[in-house]
Image (cartoon, helix red, strand yellow):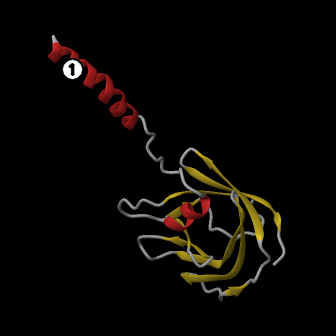
């Protein structure tokens, strides 16, 4: 009987401790600050970020290459530069790339300023030097998508 009482005592002590450890929520893919998230990953974007100054929203999902890919890739570097471009696996296409600067305005807003737009592949256009003012975008998460929603122009 003492052995059974000892086992029950140990179970009442150890079982809640092991259950509380297993109930710690796992870190979801989007559970991090926007700044860490943007710099850490490359993103598939629904449009080349900054190419069209009238674009109201951009939708970004994490880039996870699986075989051949054609589409828009956007990356943010730690030194406050971004690069967004169209890529294709075949190499015979019209390629456009946008480069510029970005800065965080607060925890959920980013401002981007386009510096250059370059064209390659089948394009015969020259590189454009745009040097635009910063444009602010609110950052939000919808499912596994990071959404940038235009807020209005910002001054340098």
Residue 118, image quadrant? bottom right
Compared with 31, 18 (above or below) is above
From the top left corner, tell me how far across and down residue 110 is, in percent. Answer: 70, 65
From the top left corner, tell me how far across and down residue 74 is, in percent. Answer: 56, 68
Residue visible at 54% across and 68% down?
39
Q: Image check: 91 left or right of 106?
A: left
Q: Image check: 14 left or right of 115?
A: left
From the top left corner, tell me how far across and down residue 153 is, in percent. Answer: 83, 68
Q: How many marks?
A: 1
Q: Which residue is mark 1?
A: 6
Residue visible at 53% across and 51% down?
30
Q: Nearer the viewer, residue 101 or 26?
A: 26
Alpha-carbon neighbours of circle 1 within 10 Å: few (<14), some, or many (≥20)?
Answer: few
Compared with 16, 4 (above or below) is above
Residue visible at 63% across and 79% down?
99
Instruction: For mark 1, give the secondary structure.
Output: helix
Residue 55 visible to the viewer: no
From the top left corner, tell me how far across and down residue 75 is, in percent. Answer: 55, 70
Residue 40 visible to the viewer: yes
Quadrant occupied by the N terminus: top left
Q: Image check: 12 left or right of 70?
A: left
Compared with 121, 47 (above or below) is above
Residue visible at 69% across and 57% down?
108
Quadrant occupied by the C terminus: bottom right
Compared with 16, 80 (above or below) is below
Task: Identify the residue at the far top of this view.
Answer: 1
């Amino acid at each position: 009987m003492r052995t059974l009482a000892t086992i029950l005592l140990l179970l009442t002590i150890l079982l809640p401790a092991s259950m509380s450890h297993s109930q710690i929520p796992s870190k979801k893919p989007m559970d991090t600050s926007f700044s860490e998230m943007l710099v850490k990953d490359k993103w598939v974007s629904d449009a080349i970020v900054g190419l069209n100054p009238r674009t109201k929203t951009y939708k970004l999902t994490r880039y996870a290459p699986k075989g051949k890919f054609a589409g828009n890739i956007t990356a943010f570097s730690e030194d406050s530069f971004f690069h967004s471009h169209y890529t294709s696996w075949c190499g015979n296409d019209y390629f456009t790339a946008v480069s510029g600067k970005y800065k965080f305005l607060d925890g959920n807003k980013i401002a981007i300023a386009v510096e250059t737009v370059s064209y390659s592949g089948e394009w015969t256009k020259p590189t454009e030097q745009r040097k635009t003012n910063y444009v602010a975008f609110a950052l939000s998460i919808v499912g596994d998508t990071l959404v940038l929603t235009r807020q209005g122009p910002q001054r340098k």
